[in-house]
């Protein structure tokens, strides 16, 4: 039986799958909206703590998404 006080070796975490964006792997590449997810998360956390501290909940615009036109942007096909 191993010694309960023995140190556990640290191992670097390894991602099991590589993050893949579907808009980068389609033909034609899809137009998409992009936004700063870190800033959005920080804004949500600030608002949550403010409400916990007694502030009134409300609707707030943190940032405007950016349009990233790609190959799927163009006129609609004729029927």
Image (spheres, grey):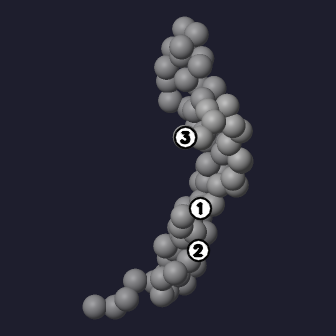
Estimate the spatial distance between the alpha carbons at disc 2 and disc 1, rounded to whole Å: 30 Å
Q: Tag 3: Cα neighbours inside 10 Å, few (<14), some, or many (≥20)?
A: few
Q: Which residue is mark 2?
A: 69
Estimate the spatial distance between the alpha carbons at disc 2 and disc 3, rounded to whole Å: 61 Å
Q: Which residue is mark 1?
A: 15
Name the spot of residue 48 as percent of width and height, x first: 55, 23
- For the C terminus, the quadrant is bottom left
Name the spot of residue 68 as percent of width and height, x first: 61, 69
**Mark toward the viewer: 2 or 3:** 3
Eyeballing the image, is 43 above or below 10?
Answer: above
Toward the top, the furthest residue is 54
- For the N terminus, the quadrant is top right
Compare marks 2 and 3 and give the one earlier in the sequence. 3
Q: Which residue is mark 3?
A: 1
Q: Secondary structure at mark 2?
A: loop
Eyeballing the image, is 6 above or below 35?
Answer: above
User: Does the image show residue 73?
Assistant: no
């Amino acid at each position: 039986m191993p010694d309960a006080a023995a140190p556990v070796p640290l191992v670097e975490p390894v991602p099991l799958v590589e993050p893949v964006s579907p808009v980068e792997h389609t033909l034609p590449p899809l137009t998409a909206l992009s936004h700063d997810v870190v800033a959005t998360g920080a804004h949500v956390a600030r608002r949550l703590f403010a409400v916990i501290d007694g502030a009134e909940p409300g609707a707030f615009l943190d940032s405007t998404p950016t349009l990233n036109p790609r190959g799927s942007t163009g006129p609609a096909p004729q029927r």
